[in-house]
């Protein structure tokens, strides 16, 4: 089992104002900021990681907040929706809460027998709260407002919008070990039995979809989880053998990564469980300090002065 892809690891999206992004995910949605660092390729920008208490794989939503970023557009070749699992009976609570905080919501719906509530963060990123058919037993991060009866459990699924389901479906099934579960109108559901949760990828097939524009309020990439570096490198070979390009192994301090663009255009990452977010802060203090990769530690003062201030 352990040499398989273990569902989702994290999802990364683009935001505008850093404080607004922090407030939305911690205060309104009740996530924990488990790491405050910088974009390793652009240290003038924060990189926030939101998740459960320890930033368990399958709970982590990360952002690059770029002040004044232009608005992106969802479309073909992108992850266009992120689904969080919530407990049965909690959606009415969330509808009220979103009303109170002026969060844009869509109508309550049902698909694959699961109730869901669509909503958008303040940058226009599409999200959903979903009541899974099978209760999600992960331990939630709780806040003063959001106790276990309503708190999110981590990801349930992610939705990709593609012009053609098949090439991407082949990667999910032949390379990542997912199985096609079922189809509902133009939505195709794929699931892995390697993990209990964060195990679903949905593909919306929209042949006429215009290409997405990756900027504010859209997803940048989705990362799948593997146990360790050895498994990671096995997957590198598997992706290469499909004739696709893939990066070398990259050290992201909290995991090791590979990136490749799947044939439908979505940027896929494969990321390891090791070493995790407690490598440079204790679990109690996760997210409290600005953490820099070692190549930037010598520039800490300049980097701190260049970043927007953040009230936590
Ligand atoms: Zn990533």
Image (cartoon, rainbow, N blue to C red):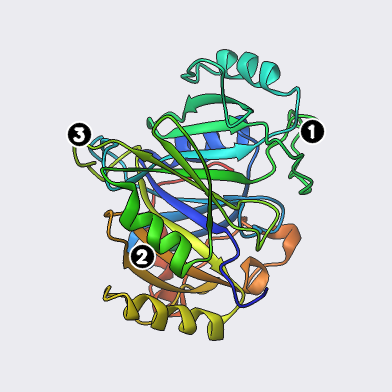
Name the one closer to the observer, 171 or 158: 171
Residue drawn 45% across the image and 73% down it: 257
Residue 38 at least partly seen: no
Determine whether label 2 and label 1 are within 8 Å by CB.
no
For the residues marked 3 and 2, what is the alpha-carbon distance in whole angstroms?
47 Å
For the residues marked 3 and 1, what is the alpha-carbon distance in whole angstroms?
42 Å
**Does 273 appear above or below 79?**
below
Name the one closer to the observer, 154 or 31: 154
- Sequence-wise first label, 2 or 1: 1
Q: Mark 1 points at which residue?
A: 147
Residue drawn 32% across the image and 75% down it: 242
Find residue 122 and report its horizontal and vertical position in percent: 43, 28
Secondary structure beneath dot 1 equals loop
Q: Mark 2 points at which residue?
A: 302
Residue 135 shown left or right of residue 111 in the figure: right
Residue 125 shown left or right of residue 247 in the figure: right
Determine whether label 3 and label 1 are within 8 Å by CB.
no
Q: Mark 3 points at which residue?
A: 208
**Residue 152 placement: quadrant:** top right
- Quadrant location, the N terminus: bottom right
- Quadrant location, the C terminus: top right
- Sequence-wise first label, 3 or 1: 1
Residue 160 shown left or right of residue 151 in the figure: left
Badge 1: residue crowd in 10 Å (few <14, some 14–19, many ≥20): few
Q: Is mark 3 within 8 Å of ligand 1?
A: no
């Amino acid at each position: 089992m352990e040499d398989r892809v273990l569902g989702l690891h994290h999802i990364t999206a683009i935001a505008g104002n850093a404080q607004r992004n922090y407030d939305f995910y911690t205060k309104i949605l009740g996530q924990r900021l488990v790491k405050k660092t910088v974009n390793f390729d652009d240290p003038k920008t924060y990189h926030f990681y939101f998740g459960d208490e320890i930033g368990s794989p399958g709970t982590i939503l990360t952002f690059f907040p770029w002040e004044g970023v232009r608005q992106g557009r969802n479309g073909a070749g992108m992850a266009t929706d992120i689904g969080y699992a919530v407990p049965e009976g909690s959606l009415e609570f969330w509808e009220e809460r979103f009303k109170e905080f002026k969060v844009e919501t869509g109508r309550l719906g049902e698909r694959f027998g699961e109730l869901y509530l669509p909503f958008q963060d303040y940058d226009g990123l599409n999200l959903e709260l979903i009541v899974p058919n099978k209760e999600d037993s992960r331990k939630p991060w709780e806040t003063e407002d959001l106790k276990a009866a309503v708190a999110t459990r981590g990801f349930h699924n992610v939705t990709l919008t593609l012009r053609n389901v098949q090439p991407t479906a082949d990667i999910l099934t032949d390379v990542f070990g997912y199985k096609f579960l079922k189809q509902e109108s133009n939505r195709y559901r794929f699931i892995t039995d390697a993990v209990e949760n964060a195990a679903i990828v949905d593909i919306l097939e929209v042949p006429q979809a215009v290409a997405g524009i990756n900027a504010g309020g859209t997803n940048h990439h989705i990362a799948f989880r593997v146990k360790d570096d050895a498994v990671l490198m096995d997957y590198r070979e598997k992706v290469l053998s499909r004739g696709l390009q893939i990066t070398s192994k990259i050290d992201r301090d909290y995991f090791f990564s590979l990136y490749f663009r799947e044939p439908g255009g979505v940027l896929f990452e494969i990321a390891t469980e090791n070493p995790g977010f407690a490598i440079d802060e204790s679990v109690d203090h996760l997210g409290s300090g600005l953490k820099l990769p070692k190549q930037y530690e010598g520039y800490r003062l300049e980097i701190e002065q260049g970043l927007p201030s953040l009230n936590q």
